[in-house]
């Protein structure tokens, strides 16, 4: 947690995707420790047992969210980025390792992204 906080502070990140959070419930106090005192919005996908778990955190002054979709392995957010309010998407992913599951996952993710019809930034774990 300290390492993540250091990286976020030094990089002045405006949006962060965390995979393998291993959290079963959202813990605002923990998120505040990581993100710091800056204002933040977040979307959370709980872990399944001791695996998975996604957290997308962003500065609401940087990204103005319009819609979100929450899947067990991805969080696509559609909104407007930056001071020019360019409509785009931020997608946090955690792809499966099994090739058959991975193929189905990317087909589903592709369809979700294509429906939004905006450029997207994808971050996360895509392969192993």
Image (tube, rainbow, N blue to C red):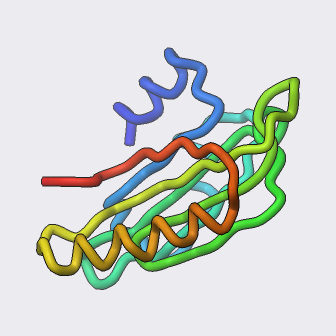
Figure check: 110 above or below 49:
above
How many badges with numbers are in the image?
A: 0
In the image, 118 versus 101, the foreground residue is: 118
Q: Is residue 24 visible?
A: no
Which quadrant of the figure contains the N terminus?
top left
Q: Is residue 73 above or below residue 118?
A: below
Residue at image position (38%, 73%) is: 107
- Name the outermost residue toward the bottom: 49
Q: Position of residue 89 (x, y in %)?
A: 65, 49
For the C terminus, which image quadrant? Answer: bottom left
Q: Residue at x 35, y 68 (%)?
A: 106
Question: Is residue 42 visible from the viewing direction of this image?
Answer: yes
Question: Picture quarter containing residue 88?
Answer: top right
Q: Is 95 on the left or on the right of 86, as rendered?
A: left
User: Looking at the image, which is closer to me, 91 or 28?
Assistant: 91
Q: Residue at x 23, y 71 (%)?
A: 102
Q: Is residue 84 left or right of residue 45?
A: right
Examine the rendered structure and indicate whether residue 85 appears above or below residue 97: above
49 and 81: which is toward the camera: 81
User: In which image quadrant can residue 35 be found?
Assistant: top right
Nearest the camera: 39 or 114? 114
Percent x, y of residue 75: 54, 64
Residue that appears at 46% across and 76% down: 46
Residue 44 image position (x, y, % from top left): 56, 67
Q: Most extreme residue toward the top, as rendered?
A: 10
Residue 118 in the figure: left or right of residue 56: right
Q: Is residue 124 left or right of residue 38?
A: left
Give x and y (percent) for residue 95: 29, 64
């Amino acid at each position: 947690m300290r390492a993540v906080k250091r990286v976020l502070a030094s990089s002045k990140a405006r949006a962060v995707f965390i995979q393998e959070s291993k959290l079963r419930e959202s813990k605002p106090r923990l998120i505040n420790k990581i993100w710091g005192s800056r204002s933040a919005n977040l979307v959370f996908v709980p872990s399944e047992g001791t695996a998975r778990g996604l957290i997308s955190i962003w500065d609401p002054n940087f990204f103005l969210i319009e819609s979100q979709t929450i899947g067990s392995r991805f969080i696509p957010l559609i909104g407007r980025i930056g001071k020019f309010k360019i409509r785009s998407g931020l997608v946090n992913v955690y792809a499966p390792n099994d090739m058959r599951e991975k193929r189905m996952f990317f087909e589903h993710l592709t369809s979700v992204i294509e429906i939004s019809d905006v450029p997207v930034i994808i971050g996360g774990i895509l392969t192993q």
